[in-house]
Amino acid sequence: MFGGSPKPSYDNTDGYNNLIDSYSDLSYEQYSTTVGGTYQFTDALYTTASFTYDVFESDEEYVYGDEDGKAYYSYVGVGYRF
């Protein structure tokens, strides 16, 4: 073959696992609490709302450092049934 390059060997992984010192000790806990409800104004018109609180706790720092944290999010909606 003229001007070609050697065929890559994608199946040759000999010795690559020896480059890994150890596996990650990543351990985390996640707690989530949600409260919500729906109120009917009429048979067709209603509103709904929800609030969620999440807590993330990790035992060790990982790729981006300390990943502990809390999250708050909510939604409010209005609907009409045809």
Image (cartoon, rainbow, N blue to C red):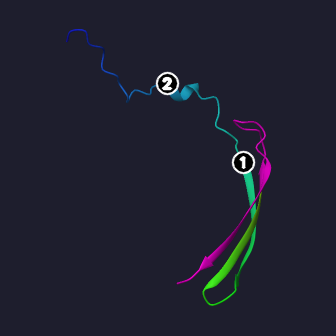
The mark nearer the N terminus, 1 or 2, is 2
Say which of 15 and 47 sits in front. Answer: 47
Where residue 53 appears, as percent x and y from the top left, is: 78, 62
Q: Which residue does the image show at 69% across and 86% down from the upper left? A: 41
Residue 57 is one of the magenta-drawn residues = yes
Residue lying farthest top? 3
Where residue 24 appears, as percent x and y from the top left, is: 67, 39
Identify the secondary structure beneath mark 2: loop
Image quarter in which the N terminus is found: top left
Characterize the local packing of mark 1: few (<14), some (14-19) or many (20 or more) Cα atoms within 10 angstroms.
few
Where residue 36 appears, as percent x and y from the top left, is: 73, 74
User: What's the amino acid at mark 2?
Assistant: Gly
Q: How many marks?
A: 2
Characterize the local packing of mark 2: few (<14), some (14-19) or many (20 or more) Cα atoms within 10 angstroms.
few
Where residue 5 appears, as percent x and y from the top left, is: 30, 14
| Residue 27 marker | 1
User: What's the amino acid at mark 1?
Assistant: Ser
| Residue 15 marker | 2
Q: Which residue does the image show at 72% across and 72% down from the upper left? A: 49
Left or right: 80 in relation to 27: left
Q: Above or below — where is 81 with respect to 74?
A: below
Identify the secondary structure beneath mark 1: loop
Q: Quadrant of residue 81?
A: bottom right
Task: Give the magenta part as a residue range.
Answer: 55-82
Q: Which residue does the image show at 78% across and 40% down from the upper left? A: 66
Say which of 18 and 35 sits in front. Answer: 35
Q: Above or below — where is 45 with respect to 53?
A: below
Residue lying farthest left? 1
